[in-house]
Amino acid sequence: MHDAMLVSGELRLAGRLDARFFALLEAIDATGSINKAASTAGYSYKGAWLVLETASNLAHAQLTERVTGGSGGGGTRLTPAAHALLAAWRQLHAAHVTFLREQDAWLVQQPALAGTLRRLAMKTTARNQFAGTITRIDAGPVTTEVVLALRGGNEITATLTSSSAKNLKLKKGLEAIALIKASAVVLVTDFAGYKLSARNQLAGTISRVDQGAVSSLVGVTLPGGEVVTTTVTNDAVSALGLAVGQPATAVFKAYAVMLAVQ
């Protein structure tokens, strides 16, 4: 599997004519039918007519024309003006793709920058995403424990099946991303002399309390600068008196941590 490109960009002509519009023109050219072309390009029939009429009005040139007669009973074809526009798009689009690939190839030659961009490109629903380096792997017959050192000096421990660890080809020194859902994080403001069995206990300071209709998002900033976010009911926020500047510890089980590697 090839890595996704780190550089992307949308090509538009005149600020409004995009790939979808030219897909419509290509489909009309191929099918001779606006109805069929609209479906191919993702337009409704009315929407296809609207975009074509608007483009024709602004260009002061008809882009399509009706064809009558024939075995199919007629249809629609592109005008010379539309063919010229489509040819320009194809040439510019090819040059655009080449440009993006060249810039992506340059970025790949900058390992640190490329690594940062790949981490930023990852999209998940997990609220907490931390980049770090694997410093320890304790493999067992069924499960494997992995310790990830974060940039700020904190550590996160993840427990996963040994088969998953093998499939990910985990090893010391490998960069990885720890993913933890906000709902899996418990906030502790006073241990009252008790010790918890959860492997991950990250002490910091509450830096954000965003209250919603039912629950609040609470952010705990760690000494290294990372922020752990948890979901807390509004009742719990009131009961614990959670406020910005208050010391708190973000607690979550090692099983709640998912690891992602390149």
Image (spheres, grey):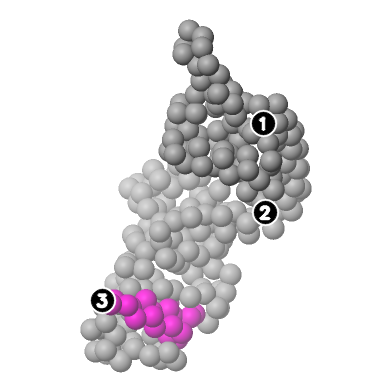
* Quadrant of image for the N terminus: top right
* Foreground: disc 1 or disc 2: 1
The label number, if any, that marks residue 82 in the structure image = 1
Residue type at tag 2: Ala
Q: Where does residue 140 sit, x and y in percent of width and height?
A: 37, 50
User: Which residue sits at x=31%, y=68%?
Assistant: 183
Residue 193 position (above or below residue 2): below
Q: Earlier in the sequence, mark 2 or mark 3?
A: 2
Q: Where does residue 27 sit, x and y in percent of width and height?
A: 55, 27
Q: Is residue 118 visible?
A: yes
- Per the picture, the main secondary structure of the magenta-coloured stretch is strand
User: Which residue sits at x=32%, y=67%?
Assistant: 184
Residue type at tag 1: Ala
Structural distance between the alpha carbons of marks 1 and 2:
40 Å
Q: Quadrant of residue 56?
A: top right
Pick the residue in front: 67 or 30. Answer: 67
Label 3 residue SS: loop
Q: Is residue 178 left or right of residue 85?
A: left
Q: Where does residue 177 sit, x and y in percent of width and height?
A: 51, 58
Residue type at tag 3: Val
Q: Is there a contact, CB below 8 Å, between mark 2 and mark 3?
A: no
Label 1 residue SS: helix
The label number, if any, that marks residue 114 in the structure image = 2
Residue beneath label 3, please?
Answer: 214
Residue 131 position (above or below residue 16): below
User: Which residue sits at x=66%, y=45%?
Assistant: 58
Residue 118 position (above or below residue 18): below
